[in-house]
Image (tube, rainbow, N blue to C red):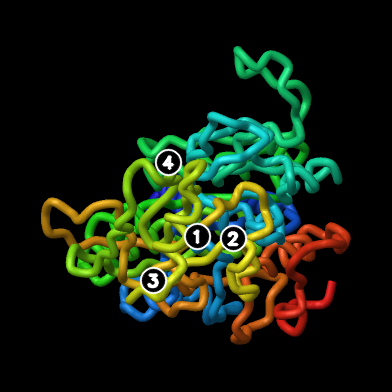
Amino acid sequence: MRWTTRIAAAALIGVLQACATPPVQAPPPPPAAVEARPPVTILISIDAFRADYLQRGVTPNLVRLAAQGITGPMRPSFPSKTFPNHWTLVTGLVPDHHGIVGNRMEDPAHPNETFTTASDAPYWWNAAAPIWVEAEKAGIRTGTVFWPGANVAWGSTITKPDHGDYAGGTRPRDWLQYNQAVNDTQRVDTVLDWLRRPAANRPRFVTLYFDRVDVVGHEHGPDSPEVTRAAAAVDAQIRALVEGLAALHQPANLVVVSDHGMSETSDTRVIPLGLPKDSYHLIEAGPFAALNPLPGKEALVEQALLRPHPHMECWRKAEIPARFRYGNNPRIAALFCLAEPRWMIVEKLPDAPFTRGEHGYDNRSADMAALFVAAGPAFRHGTVPAFDNVDVAPLLRDLLALPPKAGLDGDDTPFRAFLQPR
């Protein structure tokens, strides 16, 4: 081989070797720093989720939270209705003290008005401050998704009664007016969107409300397959929330509660009041009846009601048994009747057969037992002995580092052994 050919071949080999040699790689960029976020406290209400629904085998995410944190039997306050108990959970006071004594009520100070679940005039609510008001005043940003009463400008006064205008008052920094058309996924997404914000305007305390289990329970009864499916659907939203928090690297203390349980009722278990229509004014009926005798009819109505009845007991408001912690508030009717669980007090017999669900019964009834599960970095694992739901607000104060508050009907005693040291 000529020397020129050898040179060309050697050059070709060198080029090929150069091509086969991998280029020098630049070192990979360092991973993006993950923001160190302080824990957010999220209070979640699953309306009418009876405590024993956890044993139906369709709520793996709630069961997992209970296994990681704490759970235990929680008694609602009396009456076991939605608005009284939601206000108790965020004030630490029984309904007799915070003033929301029923889903329907009347107040001598505001004659010719009836409170319903759509009432947002502050004077109905101003007797007790909810925890988001105290948190906001302490510089803790809050947000609420549909918690009953959260749309009220708490502490405000009416300036133009004919126009519903109010002066002053405190709301959560972020809040949504209740709208049942906003589905559960949108509710969870709203909370996660709030938590995507920069730290300066990100809430540190959030409430989230689901009503699906309550709606289905009323329509079909607590023992129905429809309620079991509703419980499973809400449990899937708990999973979505937990996964969304993990994706944001957002630690959270989750406190999952219900306001009360649910009892099955039917047309075969009804108690007619049996009073002349012109003798009383009925405010609310069902599991209990709240009514006022009309002037001149007091003796007639009391004689009819204040005697032994099968499946029902009636009292003057001042004589309601002390264990209910109910009967002193001026908004409570003059006469109060309570049915046994699964029975209903009615003005007249039903026109058609029915099977459905109701609540409002004795708060110590097993059917009224409420859900309680809490998990997160603040909690050890364990089972909390039975407690009353007035203790939840003091627990929330601990999680938010708010100072203890005197005059509450509950305290944090049931939870102290299960809280991690700060």
The 10 Å Cα crowd at callout 2, few under 14, some 14 to 19, many 20 or more, is some
Expressed as whole percent of the image width and height from the top left, the position of residue 307 reads 43, 72
Question: Closer to the camera, 201 or 70?
Answer: 70
The answer to whether 68 is drawn above or below residue 298 in the figure is below
Query: In what element is the residue under mark 2?
Result: helix
What is the distance, in whole Å, between disc 1 and disc 3 at their CAs?
Answer: 10 Å
Q: Looking at the image, which residue is at 20% across and 56% down? A: 349
Query: In what element is the residue under mark 3?
Result: strand
Say which label, 1 or 3, has the lower sequence index.
3
**Residue type for callout 4:** Gln
Q: Is residue 40 left or right of residue 311?
A: right
Q: Which residue is mark 4?
A: 186
Expressed as whole percent of the image width and height from the top left, the position of residue 221 reads 26, 64
Q: Is the Cβ of the residue at disc 2 closer than 8 Å to that at disc 1?
A: yes
Front disc: 1 or 4: 1
The answer to whether 122 is drawn above or below residue 162 in the figure is below
The 10 Å Cα crowd at callout 1, few under 14, some 14 to 19, many 20 or more, is many
Q: Which residue is mark 3?
A: 312
Q: Which residue is mark 2?
A: 317
> Quadrant of the rendered structure where residue 391 is?
bottom right
Query: In what element is the residue under mark 1?
Result: strand
Q: Looking at the image, which residue is at 49% across and 70% down? A: 370
Q: Is the Cβ of the residue at disc 1 closer than 8 Å to that at disc 3?
A: no
Q: Which residue is mark 1?
A: 336
Q: Is residue 180 left or right of residue 32?
A: left
**Residue type for callout 1:** Phe
Say which label, 4 or 3, has the lower sequence index.
4
